[in-house]
Amino acid sequence: MIEDKNPQRTALENLGEFGLIKHLTQHFELNHESSLKGIGDDAAVLDFKNKKAIVSTDMLVEGVHFDLSYMPLKHLGYKSVIVNLSDIYAMNATATQVTVSIAVSNRFPLEALEEFYEGVAMACKMYNVDLVGGDTTSSAKGMIISITAIGVAEEADIVYRCDAKPNDLLVVTGDLGGAYLGLQVLDREKEVFKVNPNNQPDLEPYSYIVERQLKPEARKDIVELLEKLEVKPTSMIDISDGLSSEILHLCNQSEVGCNLFEDKIPLDPTVISASEEFKMDSTMIALSGGEDYELLFTIDQKDFDKIKGNPNLTVIGHIAPEEEGVHLITRANTKIALTAQGWNSFTS
Amino acid sequence: MIEDKNPQRTALENLGEFGLIKHLTQHFELNHESSLKGIGDDAAVLDFKNKKAIVSTDMLVEGVHFDLSYMPLKHLGYKSVIVNLSDIYAMNATATQVTVSIAVSNRFPLEALEEFYEGVAMACKMYNVDLVGGDTTSSAKGMIISITAIGVAEEADIVYRCDAKPNDLLVVTGDLGGAYLGLQVLDREKEVFKVNPNNQPDLEPYSYIVERQLKPEARKDIVELLEKLEVKPTSMIDISDGLSSEILHLCNQSEVGCNLFEDKIPLDPTVISASEEFKMDSTMIALSGGEDYELLFTIDQKDFDKIKGNPNLTVIGHIAPEEEGVHLITRANTKIALTAQGWNSFTS
C-alpha cells in the first residue's frame, strides 16, 4: 500500500547505512541546553546538572503494534515518539530527548522512511524534545521501531507507582476507550476495502476515536497543570494497556486495594455511540481497550479541592487497604474483582 | 536448532507480557549509586550529579546481524550489550546502565529468552553496568534486539570524533580482523554441517578468531588505561565496521586527512594464517571486516612517550591536513586512497 501512494521510490541500498541516518536526521535541531551532543558521534552527551535523568524504552513491531495498511507512516512516527514520552510524563518529569531506531525490509523505499521521520520531527517539535541518537538497519520482514525517551526532573517531584496510600483519590485524565474503538472502525473499513476497493469510507462521524488511535497525544499538559495546581500525585502511571491493568499495577506496587466506580469512568459521547454500534460494553472497553495514553494517578484527599471541577481530571475511585482487594463498583452497585485484561502481545 | 538443544519448552504466552519481563529481569541487581530506580515503573531514574550522561543505542536483527544457527543465545545476549558499551567507551566515558528490548516470534520458548538474559547478566556483571529498563514483545519473524547504553563522564574527559589535528598520531587497540575471520570459519562449518550433520568440527585452531566473533569484549580497560597513563585522546571512535570506515568517519568529522601504514596494522598470528587459508588479504580484512570492537583514537605527538611500548596500543599512522586526503601507505610504499568498505546492512 505504501508503494501505491508514493510514485517516487529510492532504494535504501543506494544510500548505505551512514548516508541513510544522516539523510533522515539532518534537519533535526537540538533545542535543549541539556543536549550537549546529538547524532553524529559514538553516543549522545547530555547534561542534567543536579537534576535526575528519567529513561524509558519501548519496541513497536509491525503486525503486532501497528498495521501499515491503515496507519500512515507519518502518524506512526508521531505515535512511536508519543508512546514513549507518555512514560516520562507518568513519572511527573519533563521529556527532553529521544533516540529512534528502526529496522525495515527492502520493500520500504527511502520516501517511506522520510515520511516516518516527518512524524518523528513533528512529535519532537510539539513536545519540545531533541532527537539525539538512533540506528537504521534492515529487517527480514516488516518494520520494527525502538524508541528510548529521556527526561529530567527534580528528585522531589518524581512520582513512582508504589506510593499510593489508603484513602487517596484515584484520578484519571481525559477520557478512555477511544483508541480501541478507533481501531475497530479502521479494521471494519479495511474489510470493506478488501471487498470493494472503490468504496470511500466516511470516517467523519468517527473522527475523534480514529484520531485517538492514529494520532494519540501524551499528557505533557497534565504534568504542567499539576505543577500549576501545586498537586504532587502520590503515585502515577500512564494508561497504555487499559485502565484495569494499570490500576492493578499501581495497587500491586503500592500494596494497596482500590474501589473503582463504573459510573465515574469518563467516556466521550463518540465512545458510547460506537460501543453501541459495535455491540460492545463501553466499560469493558475503557477497562481493557488500551492505547489511550492518559495518565492515572492518586492524590491525597486534602488535594481534592485543588483539582475539583477541572475538566481534564476525573476522580474515579479511591485507594483502600490491601486486604480489601481491587474492585469495580458497578452502576448496579455490585462489587466485582478487577482482573488484568491488559493487552498481551504473545497471544494471537 | 534452539528447540533441539533444550528439551524444556515453556510457551511465552503462558506468562503474559508483564510476567515475562518480570521473570527475565528479577535477578538483576542495581549496583550503581546513579541507578535510583530500575525496572518496574514507567521509566528508570538515574542520577549523574554534576557529570554528563552519555547515551547510545543500537538495533540487532536476526539474519542481518546474527545467525542463531551458530550464535548461542547466551553469547548473543552478551555480545548485544558489549556492542553498545563499546560506544560509551569510545566517548572515554564509564558505562553505567543499559536497557534491553527484544522482539521474538512464538517459536522461541521461555528457556531461550532465559538463556539470552543469562548472557545479558554476564555482560552486566563483567562490565559493571545496571539493567534499568526494557521491553519484550512478539515479532512476526525472528528476533530483534534493541539496546540503549548509558554512561557517565566529566565534561573535560569526553572525547569526540571531531577534534583530531594534523600531526596527531593514529592509534588502535588490540588487533584487527579476527571477528570477520571467525565468522568465515563458522560459516564454513555450517555448510559442512548441512552436508554431514554427524561431522564434529574441530574449531580449536580457530578458537581466538571464533571467540572474537561470538564473544567479543568492549575495551573498558583502555578507558582506564588512558586515565592511568594521563593521556586524553584528541578524538576516538570504536571499530564496529572495519578500520577503513572508522578512519574515514574520524577524518571527515575532524576535517583532516590521514596516512595509515599497512605494515603497522596489528594482526594476530591466527588472523594471518586463517587469511591465507581463506585466500583473503589480511589487510583488506582488517580494513573492512568489522565487529572487532577495538578503539581507534588520535593523540597529540607529545603524548607518544606515555603510550610507547604498551602492548595494547599500536601507532598505525598519523593525521595530515585535510587537503592531503586519507591514504593507505602499502608495504610496497605505494599510496592508495582509502574508501569506506564498511559493512552496509541494506545490500544483500
Image: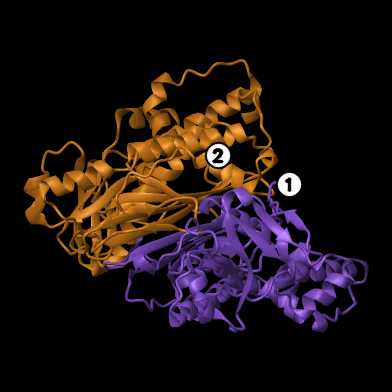
Chain colours: A purple, B orange
Locate residue B307 relative to residue B84 in the image: left or right: left
User: In the depicted view, which residue is nearer to us: B98 or A152?
Assistant: A152
Q: Residue at x 48, y 68 (%)?
A: A233
User: In the depicted view, which residue is nearer to us: A339 or B167?
Assistant: A339
* Tag 1 subunit: A
- Mark 1 lies on a secondary structure that is loop
- Asked if the residue under mark 2 is in contact with the one under mark 1, i.e. CB atoms within 8 Å, the reply is no
For disc 2, the neighbor class at 10 Å (few under 14, some 14 to 19, many from 20) is few
Locate residue A120 relative to residue A30 in the image: left or right: right
Q: Which residue is mark 1?
A: A347
Q: Residue at x 69, y 39 (%)?
A: B14
Give a yes or no on whether discs 1 and 2 share a subunit: no
Coordinates of residue A289 in the picture (x, y in percent)? 72, 62
* Tag 2 subunit: B
User: In the depicted view, which residue is nearer to us: A34 or A26?
Assistant: A34
Position above or below: B112 against B149: above
Type of amino acid at the residue the image marks with label 2 = His
Looking at the rendering, in which quadrant would you find the N terminus of chain B? top right
Locate residue A147 relative to residue B154 in the image: left or right: right
User: In the depicted view, which residue is nearer to us: A182 or A108?
Assistant: A182
Coordinates of residue B57 in the picture (x, y in percent)? 44, 56
Position above or below: A197 against B40: below
Coordinates of residue B197 in the picture (x, y in percent)? 63, 19
Q: Which residue is mark 2?
A: B23
Q: Residue at x 45, y 64 (%)?
A: A159
